[in-house]
Amino acid sequence: MKIALIGDYDAGVTAHQAIPLALDIAARELAVEVEPVWIHSSEIELAALRRFDAIWCVPLSPYADGEAVIAAIEQARRDDRPFLGTCAGYQHAVLEFARHALGIESAESSEDNPDAATPIIDALSCGLIDVGAAIDIDPGSRLGEIYGCTRAEETYHCNFGVNAEYLTAFEGSALIFSCRDEEGQPRAFELDGHRFFIGTAYQPERWALKEKLHPLVAALVKTAL
């Protein structure tokens, strides 16, 4: 299978080093062939993306072309194509849903526009750079099913996240924040009714640096099969 890695590749970024390793571990464990293909945000072609079995929107923002990334995420959501967004990918997936499913056309990230009228994504009160922390997963959620538990430890590398002031806009929608930190702040979402559409503020790919298969990566590959 081919999995598109959407983002601006940088060999010095830890997450970018880890993602191919994570997919390689999943391929070995599941006895399948997986070919990851990096696609720079400035080179996204929506028609070409439909040839991929899954899409992984990777960390490192701001992207060179954030609007193209959002368009690719919208296509994956509408096409029911397996999608995983980690860190910046998670943030842009939230923006995409806010704009195109909730009708909040002015939804932006303050990282891209410090003067954003509707900063759905905003600076965290305390940055999470290479920080490990516990997450609580809703029982009965898709994430809970994938993890097989309701509590886990994950690692972050971000300074931006979902602005708590706008969480009420998502209430009752298909996008469910089913994972939170110990303070109740959203740390991952799942999309109800989609085969696999999940975003995480943390970086599950980092498990691969310890030669461990993360359940989310395994689930992405299994769904793509």
Image (tube, helix red, strand yellow):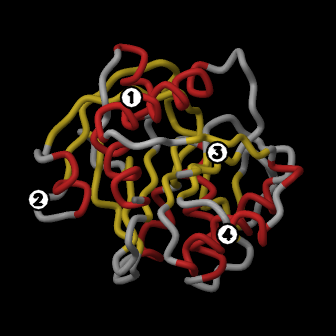
Q: Position of residue 152 (x, y in %)?
A: 20, 35
Q: Earlier in the sequence, mark 4 or mark 3?
A: 3
Q: Residue at x 59, y 33 (%)?
A: 159
Q: Position of residue 25 (x, y in %)?
A: 38, 28
Amino acid carrying mark 1 in the image: Ile
Q: Residue at x 35, y 68 (%)?
A: 176
Amino acid carrying mark 3 in the image: Leu
**Do the numbered discs 2 and 1 sit on residues whose CB atoms are within 8 Å?**
no
Secondary element type, mark 3: strand
Seen in the picture, residue 150 relative to 170 is either above or below; the reply is above
Q: Earlier in the sequence, mark 1 or mark 4?
A: 1
Q: Nearer the viewer, mark 2 or mark 1?
A: 1
Q: Which residue is mark 2?
A: 139
In the picture, measured across the screen, residue 178 lies left or right of residue 45, that is left
Q: Which residue is mark 1?
A: 25
Secondary element type, mark 4: loop
Amino acid carrying mark 2 in the image: Pro
Q: Earlier in the sequence, mark 4 or mark 2?
A: 4
